[in-house]
């Protein structure tokens, strides 16, 4: 399914409750009441689909990219929140008792205790939950604790809304819509079960062994994994995997890292890891022989089948990792197209894999442009940042307009480079990128 088809499926599910509500042919109510119900119905549909969006399903994130999927997830969470917040306030004043003109309460709201209390709790929890997710970095929780609380909290809110909808919802009590809610809630629970139970079981059956951990550059490490009792994993150059090094497949401690080796290199997987937080800071202490678990491959930063006459790789810092895999595969395939790698770092001591790059320059004629913003006295490469001026200087000729550009690095660098390339007339479809942070 293409990205566009996925969007249509998504929109179809989001408006399905509205279609079912309209088809139930209830007596008409004031317009504001109908808008209030519609806001509630769409908010709940979006909320339930959030579980699938964040479930690391390759059929979704593999098409549009994990960063795009997660941004969509975040944007939709805010949309659902806005709809949920206006939902109770748009209703015309509720009547507690059946009105003489409406003995069956078809036209007025009723508030049974269960429905009201569940809705009220969800109404309070949802904004708190979204606010906690947005402000996660400012809290002292580890990523793993936050992730667990995020999953359980979302499930609790979904169950509360389900109770609310089935007891207080005008349309949701119709069997068809009630069936849709139950189906979507079941899919949400299954998504969580898939991520937290099925995936770990699958990982346990295909463990990996730490072959080597070596220092590559300033606070940057190479981790090499070997398949343990199986023949490895099929992947495309440029993809990434979640790696768990705790030794337990069910541990929540796992981090995404790009695969820096190429499929043509054999079953060993190589990763380049920059120290950042609690897991990566101790990567250098992982002993050879330790058990690792891998969830992957994921990601869409691949160039298989791309026919552009030349390829530019533009990397900042540890963004070099997927580029190495891609360049290495081109080298193995003896791809004759011109390639340029622009690799930026703050200091020369942060440059990783200088040996690989020198070999690629020699044997594959890759043009390697090193850029350092705080250069040593004897530096003879580019200085400063990878900015629009440098991009214009390197890729400003008309022939470069048809090239493929692959970007990976700090968000500010990616935005600058992307803008500069578009200004040079490069089509958006010729720019591929991967973000290492999607929040
Ligand atoms: C697709 C992708 C590919 C990546 N490839 C590389 C690579 O090749 N080399 C490299 O050094 N770094 C890579 N990263 C970044 C790397 O995942 C984070 O630096 C690492 O997870 C930080 O973990 P920590 O526990 O040390 O830090 P923490 O302080 O725990 O986390 C810092 C931040 O990293 C992110 N993060 C942490 N754990 C996870 C997780 N399980 N899932 C998603 N995000 C998480 C969160 O945004 C968090 O706020 C990649 C990230 C992504 C999304």
Image (cartoon, helix red, strand yellow):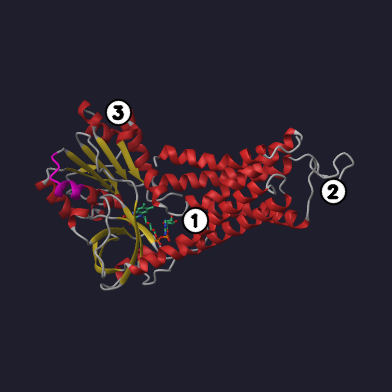
State the SS at label 2: loop
Along the line of sight, the residue nearer the viewer: 319 or 44? 44
Tell me where the magenta segment starts and ends, as one range. 327-336
In this figure, which residue is indicated by the disc labeled 1? 137
Q: Is residue 328 magenta?
A: yes
Which residue is painted at 30% across and 60% down in the image? 219
Mark 1 CB lies closer than 8 A to ligand 1: yes
Q: Position of residue 54 (x, y in %)?
A: 47, 52
Which of the 4 image quadrants contains residue 212?
bottom left
Along the line of sight, the residue nearer the viewer: 410 or 350? 410
Q: Taking 402 as reference, is 254 left or right?
A: right
Does the magenta stretch mainly form a helix, a strand or a loop?
A: helix
Q: Is residue 360 magenta?
A: no
Mark 3 CB lies closer than 8 A to ligand 1: no
Determine crowd level at label 2: few under 14, some 14-19, many 20+ residues with C-alpha closer than 10 A. Answer: few
Looking at marks 3 and 1 on the same chain, the residue that comes earlier in the sequence is marked by 1
Along the line of sight, the residue nearer the viewer: 327 or 26? 26
Between tags 2 and 3, which lies in front?
A: 2
In this figure, which residue is indicated by the disc labeled 3? 424
């Amino acid at each position: 399914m293409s990205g566009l088809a996925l969007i249509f499926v998504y929109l179809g599910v989001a408006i399905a409750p509205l279609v079912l509500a309209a088809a139930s042919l209830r007596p008409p109510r004031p317009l504001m009441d109908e808008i209030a119900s519609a806001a509630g119905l769409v908010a709940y549909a979006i909320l339930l689909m959030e579980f699938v969006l964040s479930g690391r399903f390759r059929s979704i994130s593999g098409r549009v990219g994990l960063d795009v999927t997660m941004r969509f997830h975040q944007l939709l969470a805010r949309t659902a929140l806005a709809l949920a917040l206006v939902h109770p306030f748009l209703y015309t004043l509720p009547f507690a008792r059946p009105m003489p003109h409406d003995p069956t309460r078809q036209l007025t709201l009723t508030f049974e205790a269960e429905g009201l209390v569940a809705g009220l709790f969800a109404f309070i929890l949802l904004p708190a939950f979204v606010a906690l997710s947005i402000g996660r970095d400012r809290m002292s929780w580890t990523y793993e604790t936050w992730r667990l609380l995020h999953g359980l909290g979302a499930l609790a809110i979904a169950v509360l809304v389900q109770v609310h909808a089935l007891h207080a919802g005008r349309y949701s009590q119709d069997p068809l819509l009630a069936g849709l809610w139950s189906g979507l809630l079941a899919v949400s629970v299954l998504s969580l079960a898939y991520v937290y139970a099925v995936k770990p079981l699958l990982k346990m059956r295909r463990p990996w062994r730490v072959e080597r951990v070596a220092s590559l550059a300033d606070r940057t490490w190479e981790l090499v994994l070997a398949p343990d009792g199986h023949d490895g994993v099929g992947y495309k150059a440029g993809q990434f995997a979640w790696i768990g090094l705790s030794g337990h497949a069910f541990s929540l401690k796992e981090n995404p890292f790009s695969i820096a080796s190429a499929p043509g290199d054999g079953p060993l997987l190589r990763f380049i890891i920059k120290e950042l937080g609690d897991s990566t800071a101790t990567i250098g202490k992982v002993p050879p022989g330790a058990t690792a678990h891998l969830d992957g491959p994921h990601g869409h930063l691949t160039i298989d089948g791309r026919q552009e006459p030349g390829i530019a790789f533009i990397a900042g810092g540890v963004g070099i990792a997927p580029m190495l895999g891609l360049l290495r595969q081109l080298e193995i395939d003896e791809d004759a197209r011109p390639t340029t790698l622009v690799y930026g770092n703050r200091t020369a001591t942060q440059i990783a894999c200088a040996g690989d790059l020198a070999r690629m320059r020699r044997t594959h004629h890759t043009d390697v442009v090193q850029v350092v913003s705080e250069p040593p006295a004897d530096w003879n490469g580019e200085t400063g940042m990878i900015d629009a001026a440098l991009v214009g200087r390197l890729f400003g000729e008309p022939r470069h307009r048809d090239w493929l550009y692959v970007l990976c690095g700090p968000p500010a660098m990616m935005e600058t480079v992307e803008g500069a390339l578009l200004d040079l007339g490069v089509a958006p479809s010729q720019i591929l990128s991967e973000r290492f942070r999607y929040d």
